[in-house]
Image (cartoon, rainbow, N blue to C red):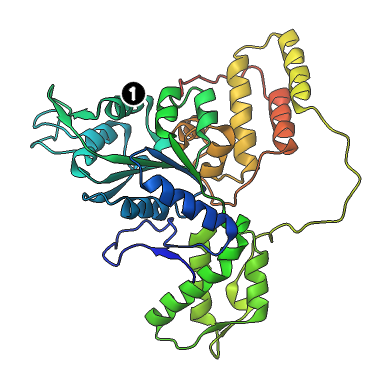
Amino acid sequence: MTRLLTFPDSQHQVLSIRAKALVFDDPASRALLAQAERVAASDATVLIIGETGTGKELIARHIHNSSGRRGPFLAVNCGAFTEQLVEAELFGHEAGAYTGATSARAGWFEAAADGTLFLDEVGDLPLSVQVKLLRVLQERQVVRIGSRKPIDVRVRLVAATNVRLEQAVAAGHFRADLYYRLSVATLQLAPLAQRPGDILALAEHFIEVYSRRLGLADVRLGSDAREALLSYAWPGNIRELENVIHYALIICRDGRVTRDDLQLHAVARPQIAAPVVAAPVVDEEEVLERVFERLFDEAPQALHARVESALIRAAYRHCHHNQVHTAALLGITRNVLRTHLKRLDLLPLPRATPARISHDVVHDVVHEVAHEPSHQDVRLHAAA
């Protein structure tokens, strides 16, 4: 029997980019479910790692529901608040603590008493807030803004990120001590394309959901549609699958969804190809070092700024101007990336598909660094 996780019926304010259902037909998914249920029995802090739309919040909710905790499950998107507001949202404030704080207000930690607090996009937290979050996890107390009185909190914390936090730590954008505190138990949620056993089960679930909404009866997937679903790369993961099925049900005829109804336009999932003669191995670091040596000999001004600018531009172009994947590629948070993009006048951005680091990135960086005018005036900003 297929295991299915969905948001509760009362949950009407789910962000559109989130996965609204999870199934566990694929062996990798079943292993993840078993691991999550083992973790749920403890009080350990959990870090869930996965791309946007893979179902991180659903896993967090299942951990809470399996834990037996009496309090509520509260979900907070750390990237949805400005740096000025995120501290007040998490830890609360007293009346008069800052302009506009007309009355005292409890933060999310207090509101989640005896329950679970889910911090999504935890990698977007400013360093100043990371320090205070670490203190809360260590001392199990919060201090509201404008107060000196600590308040005990009994909360189980589950955090999630689509950023490689170890890379963010190495880049100085995320505290190492907080990373170790968050990752006591780590769950890795694979992209949908890497768990193909779940794809058709999820498609059938969304057909059932949207058939009811559209007043359709007995809609089935054609064999060509099934083949197309299994061969597609799913860069948008489960949320993209839901949108594809929804639209297919609107335009399909005679109760049968065909390949053409799916409107799949992205590159298909790579298949195993016949062996080919390997190209000569290129040491990308050696290539970069040679470029840097040449630049050192030229003694240009603001070399660090030029290299940083070239790296941001090359990675952003390589990821087809997708902020989430560029930040993950560089090992920085999306907020830090946006600061760089604004400085380089690269916003607004078109939507694009994910990309992985490759030799092309090194080539682009080398090209950018080697050809960028040395007189360019670029100011460095601390990526805090």
Residue 99, located in which quarter of the rendered image?
top left
Residue 111, located in which quarter of the rendered image?
top left
Q: Residue at x 27, y 28 (%)?
A: 136
Image quadrant occupied by the C terminus? top left
Residue 384 in view in this figure: no
The kind of secondary structure element at disc 1 is helix
Q: Is residue 66 left or right of residue 232?
A: left
- Residue nearest the observer in this picture, 267 or 21: 21
Residue 147 in view in this figure: yes
Q: Residue at x 13, y 38 (%)?
A: 105
User: What residue is disc 1 on?
Assistant: 131
Residue 319: x and y in percent read 61, 43
| Amino acid type indicated by mark 1 | Val
Residue 124, located in which quarter of the rendered image?
top left
Residue 169: x and y in percent read 50, 26
Check the image and report above or below for 248 versus 240.
below
Check the image and report above or below for 159 versus 150.
below
The residue at the far bottom in this view is: 254
Residue 189: x and y in percent read 52, 49
Q: Residue at x 63, y 41 (%)?
A: 317
- Residue nearest the observer in this picture, 59 or 103: 59
The residue at the far right in this view is: 277
